[in-house]
Amino acid sequence: MEKALLGKTGFMVSRVTYGGIVSMNETQKDSDKYVSMAVDAGVNYFDVAPSYGDAQERLGPSLEPYRKNVYLACKTQMRDAEGAKAELLKSLEVLRTDYFDVYQLHAMTTKEDLEQVFAPGGAMETLVWAKREGIIRNIGITTHSEDCVLKALDQFPFDTVLFPMNWSLGVNTGWGDRISERVKRDNIGLLAMKTLIHRTWRDGEEHVFPKSWCKPMLDNEDLMVAGMKYGLYKGAATLIPPGNEKHFQFMLDHIDRALEPITDGEWELLRTEAAKVKNEMIF
């Protein structure tokens, strides 16, 4: 699989990421199978978080045979230094590793989040300490709020940003455009999620993919590939699929096609489909 430079980290990462939610709520045998399949396909970037149910417990043993040859990213949703340190050390233990290649402030959303992590005794103290000690190699941030992450980038030179570069939001509202410009300008590694998401779940609609809080695309290959292309067009080094094996496999099968430029026909497809879901967007 083609690799891309993840900003200033120096890491050459696979264009598809293994999202730890793929392993969540699976048997250890199935998690082992999915991780092995990923490595065989050329995936070398794995991302997980303590908030993903039992994903860490499954991914740790599955990834252990390959750990030295892949990049592992984890997260903390704690906003204070003490809580973040405890969560970091626990994740290291559960994931059976001595260090994380990327460690991220997770789900940063509000003004209060920013104030807490950057205040004396805030989580940033732990991340800076851990990087100084070699426990983490790069510091990242994940968010669903464009305003929040841009303010965070004004306060600290984060190495990576994980953000939902969703095509319907982008086409309809310009969502993500400011982040796309900022990460390119400052050489920050961009990881794009939600590129295969269609819309919100409707009331009473069967959640065919129960691990996803919003509805992934299912049976429109051209639109799914165009959605992947959109994330890469916005500057993503790698794409993170919805948290199920089927969409992960789809990305593996179609990443080569997704690396081609977006055609005029695909832009028209994205605009047409975005108009259909403009009142059902995920944010």
Image (cartoon, rainbow, N blue to C red):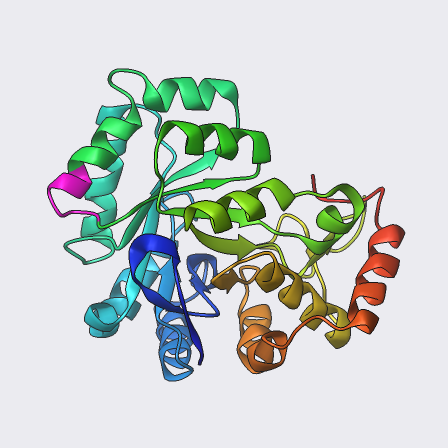
Position of the N terminus, as image quadrant, is bottom left
Number of dots carrying numbers: 0
**Residue 282 in the figure: left or right of residue 188:** right
Q: Residue furthest left?
A: 133
Instruction: Name the residue: 24% across, 73% down.
Output: 69
x, y percentage for residue 31?
Answer: 39, 70
x, y percentage for residue 44?
Answer: 35, 71
Instruction: Name the residue: 76% across, 41% down.
Output: 173
Position of the C terminus, as image quadrant, is top right
Any part of residue 85 in sight: no
Above or below 39: residue 109: above
**Residue 238 in the figure: left or right of residue 47:** right
Looking at the rendering, which quadrant does residue 80 occupy? top left
Extent of the magenta region = 130-136
Query: Is residue 132 shown in magenta?
Result: yes
**Residue 166 in the figure: left or right of residue 20:** right
Query: Is residue 209 shown in magenta?
Result: no
x, y percentage for residue 261?
Answer: 66, 73
Any part of residue 93 in sight: yes
Instruction: Name the residue: 17% across, 39% down.
Output: 130
Of the pair 129 and 235, the residue shown nearer to us: 235
Of the pair 81 and 260, the residue shown nearer to us: 260
x, y percentage for residue 85?
Answer: 21, 33
